[in-house]
Amino acid sequence: MIREPLIFELSGTGKKAFKLPQLDVPKQEGLLESLPVRQDVEGFPEVSEIEVARHFTRLSQANYCIDIGMYPLGSCTMKYNPKVNEKIAALPGLAGVHPAAAVELIQGNLAIIHDLEDSLKDITGLDAVSLQPSAGAQGELVGMMLIRACLEERGDPRKVVLIPDSAHGTNPSSAHICGYQVQEIKSNEAGTVDLEDLDRVMNEDVAALMVTNPNTLGVFERDICRITELVHSRGGLVYMDGANMNALMGVCRPGDMGVDVIHLNLHKTFSTPHGGGGPGSGPVAVKALLEPYLPVPVITKHESGYGFDFDRPKTIGRVRAFYGNFLVAAKALAYILTLGPEGIKEVAEIAVLNSTYIRKRLEGEYHLQYETPTMHECVFSDKLQKPHGVQNIDIAKRLIDYDVHPPTMSFPLIVPGALMIEPTETESKEDLDRFIEAMLSISREARENPELLKEAPHGSYVRRLDETTAARNPIL
Ligand SMILES: *Cc1c(COP(=O)(O)O)cnc(C)c1O
């Protein structure tokens, strides 16, 4: 492996990208000064054009991306997103539209938002949708604000939100930021919500239950209908974290399970790639009882065309500038329309099949804390490798040597040494087998040569980074 130097190290005085012939016309003063040429960097690298091209091309090849291989990151749904959806989002009428353009000029854009809202209503089985939130976590906050607004109007705002111990960290944060006290509920041996425990803690102080389904262990909450009934019967509402909708869509609908409000992650399930910091989109879908509180503006459709409705007395207000991340919505609608209802269902079925295939082939070699059948993801632990001194991080780092992206680690928190694997539906059997073979080979290495794992990765540009210092004290 060649270590790629810094561009500063490639620098040599007087090296230039290009040279032009002698001027044969009068020189124009002041032209270059108006260009954004930085004068203030000491030792600004001086390199030739080919050095620049090669340097950045080599660096780009050191990058991992979905076009190179799979990302088995549990809870992240890092699937391959069809390129056609990017092409559609790049159409000038979509990518070039100004957010302040007059309503008459953006009827087609509003139709996209409106149609996507309709599709998401179908998929979730709920009554109304807002595409405003920019991410899953913001969708959670908006959803909790809707619940608060509704309960306040009933004159019974309540104080507590119940959240299972397997929840994504954003759940308690969102409830807390919305002014609620968070109370954790313990999972049972199946890894699901314990109905008896819920029955014990569900009282008139509880505003809502926030439940993820399938939960972060990949386990479907079989008792979801009884759970929502119980919460409703004592005056609470049910929030479902729908980031894992990839496992359910087209097969069953949260609205039919009694869920009152859900957020979706368009940048997980609906064809926007993510991991690079955005933009994302975390729409909320709600039952009719929460509709009056949705953020403004709401997109309306009349005979005269599409429009914005700001005149909504009970709204929680604006939650972001303009109308949501529009191009993410455009991609999502393109994705939904190119799949159709049957295709959407097939996505969920294959996502579950792929994950189950991995679970069945790796069980025994890697420890499963819960025997319960799983949906789109499965969570192993390092318990069988621990006796050899090998931890989940060693396994994850060693995967890099097999040209495989590591899975999510150490989450959910209820599984010590967790390795959380979500292959998604877009991986072929051959790619799943490659991943499985790598995992099996690593489990052999853990028995026979644990030292090898503890120093992995061996073949990458960088080995083990001090991630804490890199995050707290970045030297840029
Ligand atoms: C990703 C995820 C979220 C948060 O979504 P962001 O868009 O990252 O804010 C919430 N819950 C679950 C289960 C998730 O997987």
Image (spheres, rainbow, N blue to C red):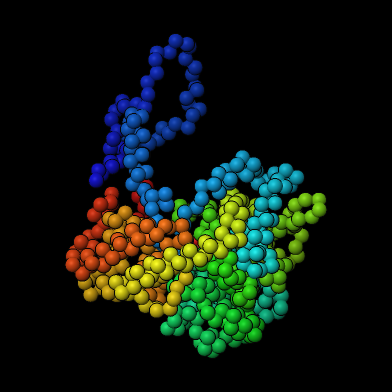
The reply, left or right, for residue 275 in relation to residue 270 is left
Residue drawn where x is 47% and y is 67% of the image: 352
Whether 168 is drawn above or below 462: the answer is below
Residue 49: x and y in percent read 36, 29
In this view of the protein, which residue sits in the foreground, 5 or 271?
A: 271
Q: Quadrant of residue 5?
A: top left
Residue 130: x and y in percent read 65, 61
In this view of the protein, which residue sits in the foreground, 340 or 207?
A: 340
Q: Residue furthest top?
A: 24
The reply, left or right, for residue 49 in relation to residue 136 is left
Residue 328: x and y in percent read 57, 52
The reply, left or right, for residue 379 in relation to residue 252 is left
Residue 426: x and y in percent read 46, 57
In this view of the protein, which residue sits in the foreground, 278 or 65?
A: 65
Whether 171 is drawn above or below 44: the answer is below
Instruction: Please indicate, yes or no, whether residue 229 appears anywhere in the rendered image.
Output: yes
In this view of the protein, which residue sits in the foreground, 422 or 148?
A: 422
Instruction: Please indicate, yes or no, whether residue 243 appears anywhere in the rendered image.
Output: no
Residue drawn where x is 57% and y is 68% of the image: 251
* Total numbered badges shown on the rendered structure: 0
